[in-house]
Image (spheres, helix red, strand yellow):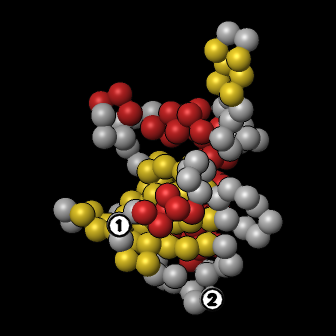
Amino acid sequence: MATYVSRALSNVSHMAPGPEVWSRYQNDLWHWFKHAHPLFAGKIAIPAEIPGIGSPQQYLAMAREICRKAVAGEAGTAITVRETKGLREYLVWYEPSGYSRGLFLVVKDCGDHGELKTMFPPIDGRTYYEAQRGQALH
């Protein structure tokens, strides 16, 4: 598989600030909590979407590793670039062999580094990734 060179994907430095006032400063905490923690409602427990991620730093470290694999063109990865209103984002799909559910990532291109906007396993799987608009790179 071809290697794709992107400084943004090779150097994901931190979570991107959220678009809303409440999410501009704690977006890393919000995304980690939302996707890596079980939800308890009374006696009902809904398992975490991405179990085993103990901190926002681990959430970001996992995203960095996935982006490195995608840049290297590793099997089970795909990259699409999406540009809207002067903003370039990389959409990354990661589904290693033997897994039934992959992860979808959005990384904002900031020139010499990237900012992770989100990482989660969509219910629709790869269909969700393929439905996004953009130009496939690999």
Compared to 40, does 88 lie above or below?
A: below
The image position of residue 47, as x and y in percent, is: 71, 32
Estimate how packed mark 1 is, as few (under 14), some (14 to 19) or many (20 or more) residues with alpha carbons within 10 Å: few
> Residue 20, position in %: x, y?
30, 34
Q: In the rendered view, does 121 fall on the left or right side of 137?
A: right
Residue depicted at x 49% and y 49%:
118
Outermost residue, top side: 42
Q: Earlier in the sequence, mark 1 or mark 2?
A: 2
Residue drawn at 73 percent across, 41 percent down: 51
What is the three-letter code of the residue carrying label 2? Answer: Met
Instruction: Report the residue marked by disc 2.
Output: 1
* Residue that badge 1 annotates: 133
Amino acid type assigned to the residue bearing label 1 in the image: Arg
Task: Report if the CB atoms under discs 1 and 2 are less than 8 Å apart.
Answer: no
Above or below, 28 against 82 in this view is above
Q: Secondary structure at mark 1?
A: loop
Where disc 2 sits, the SS reads: loop
Q: Position of residue 61 (x, y in %)?
A: 64, 54
Q: Nearer the viewer, residue 118 or 128?
A: 128
Residue farthest along the left direction in this orientation:
85
Q: Visible in this render: residue 113?
A: no
Q: Nearer the viewer, mark 1 or mark 2?
A: 1
| Mark 1 vs mark 2, CA separation in Å | 22 Å
Q: How far across and down, in percent of the image, does residue 121 sit?
A: 60, 50
Along the line of sight, the residue nearer the viewer: 130 or 54: 130
The reply, left or right, for residue 75 in relation to residue 35 is right
Q: Where the N terminus falls, by quadrant? A: bottom right
Asked if residue 77 can be seen in this view, the reply is: yes
Neighbours of disc 2 within 10 Å: few (<14), some (14-19), many (20+): few
**Does residue 90 sit above or below 5 in this rendering?**
above
In the image, 54: left or right of 14? Answer: right
Choose top left, top right, bottom left or bottom right for residue 78. bottom right
